[in-house]
Structure formats: structure tokens, C-alpha cells
Amino acid sequence: MEQSPTKTRCSFIPFTTFIDPLFWNEVNRLKINEWKLDESPKTIHCNLTFHGSQPSDSLLCFDHESLKNVSEDNVKINSGIYNVEGTFLLLNTKKAFLELDRTILLKNIAETLWTLITTNEWLKNPNALNTFYLTAFADVKNFAYYFWNCIPALLFPENIHQTSQFESPNIELHSLAFEFLVSNNGKPFILTNDQKALKLEELIEQTSPDDFLFVFPNPSEVQEKFGWPLRNLLAAIAYLKPTWSKLRVFSLTRLYQNSFISTLFWDIIKNEIETIPKCVGWERTSNDKLTYRSVDLKFMLDPINIMEQSVDLNLKLIRWRQAPSISLDKFTSLRILLVGAGTLGCNIARALLGWGVRNFTFIDYATVSYNNPVRQSLFCFEDCLVAGLSKAEAAANALRRIYPKVEAKGIHMKVPMPGYPFSEEEEDNVRQSCDQLEDCIKNCDVLFLVMDSRESRWLPTLLASVHNKLAITVALGFDDFVILRHGTNPESEQQKCKLEPEMSEMAQDLHAELPGSLLGCYFCNDVTAPGNSTSERALDQHCTISRAGISMIASGFAVELLASVLQHKLEADAPARMSEMDASASLLGATPHEVRGFVSTFQQIMPTIRRFDRCTACGNSVRHLYSQEGFKFLSKIFNDPTELERVSGLTELQQQANAFQTQMIELDDNESISSI
């Protein structure tokens, strides 16, 4: 008499969640750029392998591809890999992650599974029963991640056992089953006794569990043990066929020698099921504790990339919380030229870093001295020890040390100036300096003029006007400062003429705006040409003497003026109000022409000055002569600044003023005589 096979209690090998660091890297990117503060559940996927008792089996593997959309065409069943679709819930705070009610969450997941089973929807897509619910919190600033995964399994039917004897399929049967699994996109199916493969929808027509094999890809790392996905499949089959109490299961793996066939038994369902079966699934740690896991990737990821993401996060928080429409690309793509690498140049560069600016060029002829580091924020004591270290080069090096992603260049160069004549032997060097300065201005988007003397600002102002670049001048006194954005250059004379009538109307309305093309430059208020102002300076006049905090105040205002202008729809052509400023002029506020601050009274004013047609730097005649003669014109000005007054029309204006004054004196004298 043949003995019936012995039965052992069936155990299912649970999954272990494996998350590649690149998954978290992609989470960082999406959190910062797309999801922001969105806490809605998101559909993602992971990979499972069913090679057959291999270490990688039973691992739910998440990588950077897990957060992308996947189609059935991407399934790599023939390589022993298939996709599992699930849900990703990323919380905004660690507190929310820790206090999440996972009991209720598991109950909701069980309801969803049970609905699939009771409506027979699972037959169309049996893989929907094999899912996960990954909860997480990402500390994107510190690159620390907390996660707890749920792989739900219904504890139904009850008392599941399996035969202790296993049947090994031959290679032909394995080949037939594997080929159909591949064509069926990894979905379980049935294989009739006459070796006909059928999709799972045909299970409804089956009358006896002895007539077929239930085939599923088994992701178990333990030989002759079933993987976790079989639990929900058994629950669905037991509900669909309540009179059955057994099932012949073909555990299919890529390696046919590790595949096996076994019969499972369970208690017949005698009564109608009125409640949802109990569900388990929250993953345990390697120490068998029912709790979350965490990982710190701060030391695994490239520190430079970590810093880049952290800097980007700081900027994008502005967009999330304060200014959703802000265009951050206008900062990150900006090319900045700083003519002057002293107190102002250093502080402005540091502030621009905070806006995400990454491209800097410094021009300065001075070297770092012992009195510099305490006020000039990019220099340190060690820089003073290097004899003849260029301020421009030292400033560029400091920016790269602060933020390695910065592109910073220092040019040790003296800017040619009016009133500083040169010899024939020096002409080539002066010409080269002029050409180099012009190239720098051509290749920048914004230049800051932060030099010590008035005359050193003349040539950069002229070149900025010629090449229509946004220039901002910042100058300091002892307890006051001025910040001025230079007007843009009208594109054509026709445009300029069109603007003239508008200006006539604006002159009658103090609340009108002055267009950016009609704003004056730093020299538009002057009635004399810039000249050599250093030849008679005493020792105490060779350095800018100012209150200690004034440079930081002025630098901050200058950078924020640029920020407001960049976020205006007209950018550099943004108009300036002629009286009270409009805080809604741009996304970040007003766009004044000038800011003058007085620290002794803690006050500031914001005048708006119209472009002067006889300006020695941006006047039409000066720009026209430079365009025609180039260095020939500049050499005249360097050797004799009064030439600048003549060509700009200032000399003629002064003569007219003197003649008018003389005429008025004569009139006064005549009137006084006649009255006696």
C-alpha cells in the first residue's frame, strides 16, 4: 500500500529591501526640482530576481531607475529579472515619518488587495498582488535617509502545508514554461497536464486543481522554499475556488535545476468570508526588530556634488516658500566681471555665491598686504606671506576653495586711466591692457566697478556702454556709499528718438518711470573729465578709509539691486521710478537707479538721474569716437584728459555757461546804474 507523502508547514521567504545609493541621489534631485513639499504617494518600481537560490533572490532592489516610468517592454524576464510596482511615500519631516500610523496604512493596503481579489481584477494583472509600500524621509541637506518598507501579505487561507517530497521538472518542461513566462511579461500562468500554457484568466474555467500546474517566478534565495509573492496569489486562488484545498505549484527559476514542483494544502473555506483577512508586511531589520532603517550617505557621495546639491537646495527653498516664479537660471548662468578685488569686490563676490553665481573674473593690479584680510573677506593671513600675490588671483583661488564648482579667474592688470600718460615704450602694454579689458567686458553679462578712484572707472564704463553690458558702480566714503546701475545703450537712434517724447511727458509726472536706456552712468553728473586724483595724495589718502561695516552694507545692496533687476521682465532695461520706489516692480522688489546710504543717520535715498548727452563716458560723441578710432582715441585721453571735455561737448557747455554768466553780470551792472 502506497504511503501518502508527509506534509510540513509551509513557510514563505520574506523580501529584504536593498536600496542603491543612486536611488537616494535621484530622490534628492526630484525632491529639490520637482516634488518640493509634495507628500502625495508616488508610483515607483523595483527589481526582483528569480535565478534560483541565489543571494540576489528575495531582494527588492531599488536604484535610480526605480523612480522612472517603466513599461512592460522594459521587463527583462529572460535575464531572470522582473519589475514590481509599488508606492513611495516621502514625508517632509522626520517627525511625520516616525509618527505615521502604519497600522492604519497596512489596513488600507489590505483593503486594496482584498478588493482586487474579490472582484477578480487580479486575474487580469496578477502582478498587482505583488506590491510594496515604501515610506521614507530624506534629509537632503545632510544626506541622511530613513525608510521602512511594507510588502503586504494576506494571512489566508489558513493552515498552509506542503509536501515534503519535491518533483524536479525536466529541461523540456522548464523551457516551455520559461518561454511562456517571458512572452507573458513575467505574470503567473497555468500549465495544463497536456502541457498547454494558459493565461491566468483561464483559471476560472478549471474544475480540478489536479488538471494543471500553477506556474510563478519564484524569487526565493532558499532552495525548495517559496518566495513571498506566492502568499497573496494563494489567497486569491483560495477565494476564487473555495472548494479546493490544494494546489500544484511549479516554482519556476531561470536555472532549471533549481526549479521544483510541490503540492500545497490548506483548510477548505467552509463559511462566507465577511471580514478582510489579517495582513502582515512591515519589514524587520537584520536584528529581527520591527522598526525602520536609516543610512547616512554623506561620506559615500562625492563631497563636491554634495555641496552642489546643498547650494541648489538653499536656492530652491526660496522658490518653494517665497517666490514660486523666480528664475534661478538667471543667477546660475551669470558671468560676473569684478573690476577691483578689494573690500567691495570680495564682499560682492561672496554675496553672489549665495545666489548661485558660479562664473567670476577679477581684475586688479594690487597685491595682498597685511592690512587686507581683516576687511577683505576673501583673503587670509597665509596670503600675506606670499610675496607679490595678486589680489585678483588670490580672490579667484579663495572662491574655488569656498565652492569648488565655481569657475573663477584672476587677472593681474592695471586699468589704463585718463590723466596717466605713458611713454612710447609702454604703449604696447597699455594697448594690450585695453584689449584685454575689452575682451573681459565682451565676455561678461554684468560688471561691477569697485575700484578706489574715479578715473579708474572711466574706461570700463565706456566699454560697458559700447557693448551694452549692465554695469553697477559701488563707491564708499567714510560713512556713506553710493550704488548706481548704469543705463543701457539704446539699440538704435530710431529707438532713442522714440523715447524722447515719453521723457517729456514723464518730466511732468514725478511718479513716472525713467526707462533703463535713459538712466545715467557714474559720470553723467560730472561737468569735468576724470583725471589723475592720486598724484597729490598723502599717506592717509592712499587707502579707502570707511567705517568697518559699510562695505558689507553697500555690497549687499548692490547684489540685491542686481537680483531685482534680473528678475524684472526687462532685466537690464528695467525702468527706475523718479520718486517713490515700487516694491512690486520686479519679483524681488524695486529696481532703483541709485542707492545712496548714510550710515551716520542710518538713512538712504534713491535718486534717479537721466542720461547726460555730453557725458564723458556714455555720451554719444565719446562712444562714436571710440568706435571709429579705438586705441588712438584712448591714448589721447590717457595723455590729456581735457581732450575728453572737448570731444564730449563739456568744453562748449562750459563756455556757454561762462558767456551766460558774463551776460547776466553785465545786465545786473546796467540795471544798478540806471536805478541811481
Image: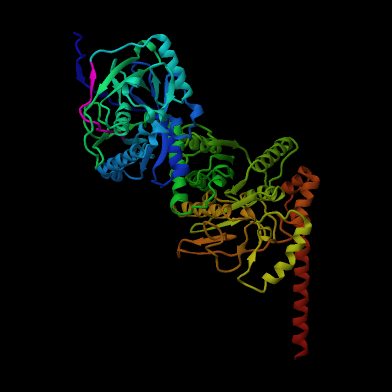
In the rendered image, which quarter is residue 87 located in? top left
Give whichever of 287, 461 is nearer the camera.
287
Q: Is residue 570 above or below residue 168?
A: below
Q: Is residue 613 above or below residue 378?
A: below
Region rendered in magenta: 149-163
Give whichever of 304, 128 is nearer the camera.
128
Q: Residue at x 78, y 89 (%)?
A: 674
Q: Main secondary structure of the magenta part?
A: strand
- Residue 254 horizontal side relative to residue 511, left or right: left
Give whichever of 435, 98 is nearer the camera.
98
- Residue 426 horizontal side relative to residue 568, left or right: right
Q: Position of residue 251 (x, y in %)?
A: 34, 19
Does residue 291 appear in the picture of this structure?
yes
Extreme-right residue of the structure: 628
537 part of magenta stretch? no
Instruction: State the quadrant of the N terminus.
Output: top left
Q: How many marks?
A: 0
In the rendered image, which quarter is residue 7 located in? top left
Q: Is residue 505 above or below residue 340?
A: below
151 part of magenta stretch? yes
Q: Position of residue 498 (x, y in %)?
A: 76, 63
Q: Position of residue 581 (x, y in %)?
A: 55, 65
Does residue 372 appear in the picture of this structure?
no
Q: Position of residue 633 (x, y in %)?
A: 77, 47
Instruction: State the quadrant of the C terminus.
Output: bottom right
Give whichever of 105, 411 is nearer the camera.
105
Q: How is the image coloured?
A: rainbow
Q: Residue at x 71, y 70 (%)?
A: 504
Q: Is residue 158 above or below residue 490?
A: above
Q: Residue at x 45, y 63 (%)?
A: 600
